[in-house]
Image (spheres, rainbow, N blue to C red):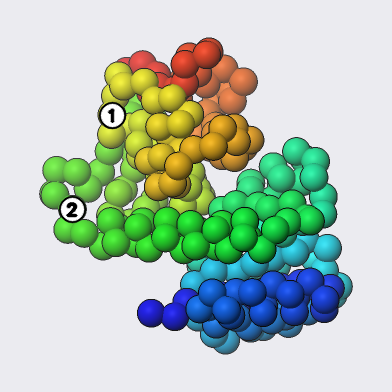
Amino acid sequence: MQHTVLLVEDDISISEMVQEYLVREGYKVIPAYDGEAAASLFQSQAFDLVLLDLMLPKINGMDVLQIMRGKSLVPVLIMSAKDSDVDKALGLGFGADDYITKPFSMIELAARVKAAIRRANYVLANATDPVKPDSLCLTIGDLRLDVDNFSVQKRGIDIRLTAKEFQILKLFVSHPGRVFTKAQVYGFIWNDEYYGDENVINVHMRRLREKIEDDPSHPKYIVTLWGIGYKLGDCS
């Protein structure tokens, strides 16, 4: 099956280089050179993955990402010359699945693309599996997870989580008392080998806590065991 990639990059030389390489790798690549064109293409066609630059004319990359996340959970890989943790956190907080910093090698980019599509297909396959009636809803403290509909409520109010945030929360609620290292969390949620990049996990965990905790600086749902990992808190 040939996967289709939306490549959003305003630098024509970079766009052509990435497009040429991914086409040789077997992907179909649709280029967009500004945010407006990217949003229009995304709404009119189906894509398996989006490669998204942040610094775009007409509509910036963050706004494009928000538009996409309002309609789809398709994996989004950010390509950015900005290398600060703030930019990475902002991008991932808005729902990006991964990021790669310019300049990057084509081999690394292709590996990230392949991994992101594989993870998305894995999640989709598991989400469409039959769910046992007694596992449709999970409750912990004031939180109620509807596994079948990927929704979460806190005290009866809907909470909007990204796909990764929902999967992280479900992992801990489904395994009360179990301690997960960062490597294990990454393996379960990203379905990929962990190379020690803690920033991705830290960002997703912080954003999740901001949404589900009354006091994110003193979490009660997912607590940190320093030097070990995380576990579900005692919310009884």
Indicate the quadrant containing the N terminus: top left, top right, bottom left or bottom right.
bottom left
Q: Residue at x 54, y 69 (%)?
A: 49
Residue of label 1: 175
Q: Mark 2 sits on what residue?
A: 131
Is 175 left or right of 89, judged from the image as shown? left
Taking the image as drawn, is residue 54 in sight? yes
Residue shown at 62% from the left, 60% from the top = 107
Position of residue 152 measured from the top left corner of the image (x, y, whole percent): 40, 45
Q: Tell me the SS state at disc 2.
A: loop
Residue 78 placement, left or right of 140: right
Residue occupying the point 28% across, 56% down: 126
- The answer to whether residue 155 is visible is no
Q: Amino acid at mark 2?
A: Val
Residue 147 is situated, as x and y percent measured from the top left of the image, at 30, 49
Q: Residues within 10 Å of mark 1 (few under 14, many from 20)?
A: few
Pick whichever, 133 or 175, lies toward us.
175
Q: How many numbered discs sit on the rendered protein?
A: 2
Q: Is residue 61 left or right of residue 119?
A: right
Q: Secondary structure at mark 1?
A: loop
- Chain-order first, disc 1 or disc 2: 2
